[in-house]
Amino acid sequence: MRTALALLTVAPLFAQSGIDLSIPPSPAFHVLGQTPTVIQPASPREFAVSLLNGIDQTGLSIDIAPYWLAAGHLVDREKYKANPIVRLLAGTQLSLATTKSPQSAEPSGLAASIQIRIFDLGDARLDDLLADCLQEAAQKVLASAAPCPEADDCRNDENTHREALLRSTCRQAAKARNWNRSAWAVGGAGNAQFDAAWSSLAYGFEGVPGLESTSQFIVQWTRLNRQSVGGLRLRMGGADTNVSADWVGKDGQSQFSLTAERKIGDNLWLEVRVGGVSSQRIFVLTSFHWAPVRQ
Amino acid sequence: MARQTAHIKSGGGTPEIEIRFGNANVGAYRVFLWEAGRDPKQIGDTAQGRVSLESPGKLAIARVSYEAIIQSPEPGVNQPYSISVQIYQDGRAVPGSSYLERGRLNPDGAKSVIGFIAFEVS
């Protein structure tokens, strides 16, 4: 979850509501209300090691993409592009979280969750321009180096050197192209006492002149312990700077806000939000983050 | 670092090497032939689906190396990668030639892999 710095620009009557409808990065731990150490194993071996290491920790969340873990090595980019079932399976993530008190050997909390990316037109793995850009960068790096002899111990140094040369701008350019594409992701999480569900559907105005590269409309719905919250968002601008108009409905109340945000660092956003909620005619400034999940 | 010994048949056809990148990543590679007393010769790259090597007799006293770079289209750390290498002779996988490496890309979303293959001819 990105860090946002909210500037309170309205009178003291206003307070922050803290409503966040986005799908959390590790939903199972979200249900447990913890800030976890999240482990994301990339291979079956790492998965086994993570489980063994996690036994001694007070809290652990393992996020795995089962299909990637089991069959990722069989899926090249062409297969991924050609088969929507492969993309659906690859975009499914399971999360298992436990907490326990340091004094007790037994887990005191256990939650599970699932996230499914139904579709994502902004999926970077589908972007041919990005693939061509990355391929070209890699070929340049390979062409610039002499072949590594077997007898020399050049491999580690050479590998590190080549990897360092690959800090290209390909992904930034792709992000600027794809930031507002249509996508739909859903998620659910629960344990014995608590359940939650999320859905985030974004429309990127594909093919609509003037809006295709500048706008996105998001419909989001969250259900937390049998209480539903719905919202709409219209976002305009670019990947790193945009303004949005939000509406959230909860318990018969409507909340509106206007937000301007600008990315000022890798994980740091400057956000100015002005809004209000119609509750006994008191207007409130809200601060909540809202975006479709991207893996 | 990968080092394999592929068992090929002297009477078989020209072996081929296939390098594949999993997790829908983008990969590029080049393949070299190393003969004793000679400079390495590049015999193939990403443009070829399978790269033809040399005759079994020549490979018996040579080495083949492959140098690959894998990148994830997705930004962010912890992106998974996999690379698989397989040599075929007469359309069949050659014993001892399979190599699979899996792991995570570096924080910049890249991984460089260099491997060598020796040949045993029977």
Image: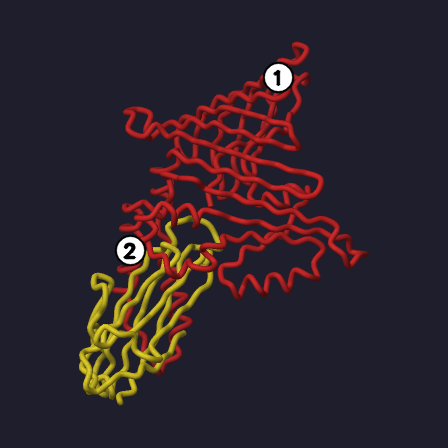
Chain colours: A red, B yellow
Q: Residue visible at 70% across and 43% down? A: A192
Read off the chain for label 2: A
Q: CA distance from mark 2 to mark 1?
A: 51 Å
Q: Is residue A181 left or right of residue A255?
A: left
Residue in the foreground of this view, choosing between A194 and B40: A194
- Callout 2 touching callout 1 (CB < 8 Å): no
Splitting the image into 4 quarters, where does residue A154 fall? bottom left
Residue in the foreground of this view, choosing between A37 and A201: A201
Q: Give the percent coordinates (x, y) of residue B86.
A: 31, 72
Q: Are marks 2 and 1 on the same chain?
A: yes
Is A83 drawn above or below residue A214 in the view shown?
Answer: below
Extreme top residue here?
A281
Read off the chain for label 1: A
Quadrant (top left/top right/bottom left/bottom right) for the N terminus of chain A: top right
Q: Give the percent coordinates (x, y) of residue A160.
A: 41, 66
How many labels sit on residues? Answer: 2
Is A271 drawn above or below residue A99 in the view shown?
Answer: above
Q: Which residue is mark 2?
A: A135
Mark number for residue A221?
none
Q: Is residue A164 left or right of residue A142?
A: right
- Sort mark 2 into few (<14), some (14-19) or many (20+) by Cα contacts within 10 Å: many
Q: Residue visible at 66% across and 33% down? A: A225
- Amino acid tagged 2: Gln
Q: Give the percent coordinates (x, y) of residue B108.
A: 43, 55
- Amino acid tagged 1: Gln
Q: Which residue is mark 1?
A: A253
Residue in the foreground of this view, choosing between A163 and A1: A1
Splitting the image into 4 quarters, where does residue A16 fall? top right
Q: Give the percent coordinates (x, y) of residue B100.
A: 40, 69
Describe the element under mark 2 as helix, strand or loop.
helix
Describe the element under mark 1 as helix, strand or loop.
strand
